[in-house]
Image: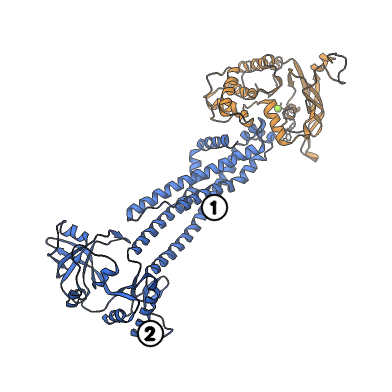
Chain colours: A orange, B blue
């Protein structure tokens, strides 16, 4: 093909989307107590993008991230990864998918307490069935990518917040995923530490070709991304990826 | 998957050492009690079998008394007479040898030294019945028995203590206020059934009853069957003779009993069987309590580590990986408890065996079974908490506060 003429309707650019949400809704609870966290979202992410999702509190950003990360299924609409509808997949296949293709970075770091950095980082490889020696080698490599070479044996409680988040990023990339999902990765850090984390994510995106989806409240952080998506009340109110394409 | 899980399980348990130790306690006690009691029971059985086989397999013991449960009631029951002994000797065709037997503990004195020893009055046949002879000197003869001679044969312990290892033969030993001349030293038999078999003074029965007891009532009769396969006939003949002599009508309760080593073994085994059953009950209760303790701690642990479970699910653990992790953790708890229990049980049994001089036995089968049960308890009581963990929704687990 190669020609920019034939492209799916409504789509921005030539590459086929890696992740694609179509009319996705998510409702928590039932009846009167039901909360509609997502209200018809259309969003495509192509390989190599760095997307920042912003928006007011309660607008559905984290809900969208958990659907992207296969931690939760949409109530309505369709989510496809490389064209494959996620709702048809079994729990074990979803687990394998999370293990091989996604890396997660959380606001609260979510490392194992009192456990050496190396062991935290190697954890996804345990579930990938990688042998002990190879696990240690790859975890060491990931730690050096995030600038923590030499701190392999430091325990979680002996690390600063910024260092803990870098261990978490090393854990997210140790299995060489295509996509890193980061939900407010700098939310618990001061602006200086936050900037370091942003530089790290930018480098992963630029130098390692990892697709990054990041939720943030901070405009400075959002500025690192090449595409901004703004949520409000479960809807996308602005998507400059689309604007740029049209 | 199992191997990394076992490593993770150990790490998780070590993070909470005190709690893990307390949780294991029920299993430790259950397994420890089983192993210790089985070891002690095995030691006691070995010890009693040894003691019984040391008696000689054809041996019969005739004692007065009426049967009461497992034991024998002796109060108000007539003892035996020399006439009974003679009647058995001459009328019971399948009885080879008969001896009256009496025993009492007396103070024995030589020179400036004294000790309390078992002083027994016996007929010369006794030594043949028990296949026991002297290491030096000689046994007393039928002639000396008939005369009521003041002679005696002593055991090695008496020699070592009173004669400081010198030969006592030909010297006089004072028994209470009577004197007897030592004519022989018995072969050493060591300890048996809790008593030093060498701490003895044997004298002719006639001399014993006349000079030490003061009457001719006989408290026990020892006999031997003509051969091992005639024991039942010999017993029946003795019973028949004694029924007649003691005027016991058909259908009345016996006021004596004829025992052979198999009976002693059977009585002992029925007592051991009861103890074992009782103990199995105690151990079962303890293991169930231990299992519930493990279940409780695992439920607490699943709640405490909900976020950890969420992270594991997010980074690619399947629910069966989480199930395995918690199941292995519960099983590791109970298995370590089992190992500690086996260790403490064996150590305790060893200490007791040393203390009361019985053989120390490692009960291989019971140990293996107790350990296997401890593992099963871990799996059985760990399943529910582990399933609870495995069924967590990844997102809900991650958001858990
Ligand atoms: N498990 C749940 N049960 C019920 N309602 C939920 C649940 N999770 C989220 N919600 C609701 O869904 C809406 C969207 O929540 P979400 O966490 O996606 O918001 P957000 O944009 O990430 O907000 P914030 O910036 O504060 O993190 C909110 O109104 C929230 O109360
Ligand atoms: Mg959020």
Q: Secondary structure at mark 1?
A: helix
Front in this rendered view, residue A13 or B217: B217
At label 1, counting other C-alpha atoms closer than 10 Å, the crowd grade (few under 14, some 14-19, many 20 or more) is some
Q: Quadrant of residue B200?
A: bottom left
At label 2, counting other C-alpha atoms closer than 10 Å, the crowd grade (few under 14, some 14-19, many 20 or more) is some
Asked if B196 appears above or below B237 in the picture, the reply is above
Q: Chain of mark 2?
A: B
Q: Quadrant of residue B392?
A: top right
Query: Is disc 2 in the same subunit as disc 1?
Result: yes
Asked if B259 appears above or below A20 in the picture, the reply is below
**Residue B247 in the image, given as x and y percentages of width and height:** 36, 86
Query: In screen coordinates, is A59 left or right of B312?
Result: right
Q: Is residue B401 visible?
A: no
The quarter of the image holding the N terminus of chain B is top right
Tell me the residue at 33%/84% (across/down): B245
According to the image, label 2 marks what residue?
B248
Q: Chain of mark 1?
A: B
On residue B35, which mark appears? none
**Residue A115 in the image, given as x and y percentages of width and height:** 54, 29
Asked if B35 appears above or below A43 in the picture, the reply is below
Query: In screen coordinates, is A195 left or right of A213?
Result: left
Sequence order check, earlier mark of 2 and 1: 2
Q: Secondary structure at mark 2?
A: loop
The quarter of the image holding the C terminus of chain B is top right
Q: Quadrant of ligand 2?
A: top right
According to the image, label 1 marks what residue?
B288
């Amino acid at each position: 093909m190669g020609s920019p003429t034939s492209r799916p309707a409504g789509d921005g650019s030539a590459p086929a989307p890696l992740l694609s949400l179509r009319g996705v809704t998510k409702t928590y609870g039932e009846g009167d107590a039901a909360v509609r966290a997502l209200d018809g979202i259309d969003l495509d992410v192509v390989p190599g993008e760095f997307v920042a999702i912003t928006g007011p509190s309660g607008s559905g950003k984290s809900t969208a991230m958990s659907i992207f990360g296969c931690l939760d299924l949409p109530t309505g609409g369709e989510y496809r990864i490389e064209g494959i509808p996620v709702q048809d997949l079994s729990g074990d296949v979803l687990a394998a998918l999370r293990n091989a293709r996604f890396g997660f970075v959380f606001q609260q770091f979510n490392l194992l307490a009192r456990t050496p950095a190396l062991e935290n980082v190697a954890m996804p490889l345990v579930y990938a069935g990688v042998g002990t020696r190879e696990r240690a080698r790859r975890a060491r490599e990931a730690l050096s990518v995030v600038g923590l070479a030499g701190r392999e044996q430091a325990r979680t409680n002996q690390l600063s917040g910024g260092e803990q988040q870098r261990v978490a990023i090393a854990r997210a990339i140790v299995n060489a995923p295509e996509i890193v999902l980061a939900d407010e990765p700098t939310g618990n850090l001061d602006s200086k530490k936050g900037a370091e984390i942003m530089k790290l994510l930018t480098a992963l995106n630029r130098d390692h070709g990892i697709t990054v989806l990041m939720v943030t409240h901070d405009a400075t952080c959002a500025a690192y991304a090449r595409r901004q998506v703004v949520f409000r009340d479960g809807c996308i109110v602005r998507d400059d990826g689309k604007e740029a394409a049209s | 998957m199992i191997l990394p899980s076992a490593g993770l399980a150990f790490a998780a348990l070590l993070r909470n050492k005190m709690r893990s130790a307390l949780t294991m306690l029920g299993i430790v006690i259950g397994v420890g009690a089983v192993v210790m009691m089985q070891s002690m029971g095995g030691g006691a059985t070995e010890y009693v079998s040894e003691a019984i086989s040391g008696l000689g397999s054809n041996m019969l013991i005739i004692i007065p008394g009426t049967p009461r449960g497992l034991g024998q009631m002796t109060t108000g029951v007539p003892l035996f007479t020399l006439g009974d002994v003679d009647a058995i000797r001459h009328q019971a065709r399948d009885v080879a040898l008969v001896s009256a037997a009496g025993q009492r503990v007396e103070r024995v004195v030589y020179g400036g030294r004294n000790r309390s020893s078992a002083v027994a009055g016996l007929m010369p046949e006794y030594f043949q019945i028990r296949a026991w002879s002297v290491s030096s000197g000689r046994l007393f003869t039928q002639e000396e028995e008939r005369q009521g001679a003041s002679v005696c044969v002593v055991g090695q312990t008496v020699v070592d203590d009173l004669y400081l290892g010198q030969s006592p033969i030909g010297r006089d030993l004072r028994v209470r206020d009577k004197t007897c001349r030592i004519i022989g030293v018995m072969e050493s038999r060591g300890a048996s059934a809790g008593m030093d078999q060498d701490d003895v003074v044997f004298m002719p029965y006639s001399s014993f009853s006349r000079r030490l007891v003061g009457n001719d009532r006989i408290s026990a009769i020892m006999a031997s069957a003509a051969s091992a396969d005639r024991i039942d006939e010999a017993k029946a003949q003795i019973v028949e003779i004694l029924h007649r002599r003691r005027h016991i009508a058909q259908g009345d309760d016996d006021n004596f009993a004829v025992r052979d080593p198999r009976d002693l073994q059977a009585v002992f085994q029925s007592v051991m069987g009861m103890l074992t059953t009782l103990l199995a009950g105690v151990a079962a209760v303890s293991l169930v309590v231990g299992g519930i303790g493990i279940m409780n701690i695992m439920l607490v642990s699943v709640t405490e580590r909900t976020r950890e479970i969420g992270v594991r699910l997010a980074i690619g653990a399947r629910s069966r990986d989480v199930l395995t992790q918690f199941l292995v953790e519960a099983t590791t708890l109970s298995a370590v408890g089992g190992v500690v229990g086996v260790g403490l049980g064996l150590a305790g049994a060893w200490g007791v065996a040393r203390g009361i001089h019985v053989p120390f036995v490692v009960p291989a089968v019971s140990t293996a079974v107790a350990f296997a049960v401890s593992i099963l308890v871990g799996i059985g009581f760990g399943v529910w908490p582990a399933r609870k963990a495995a069924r967590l929704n990844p997102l809900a687990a991650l958001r858990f506060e």
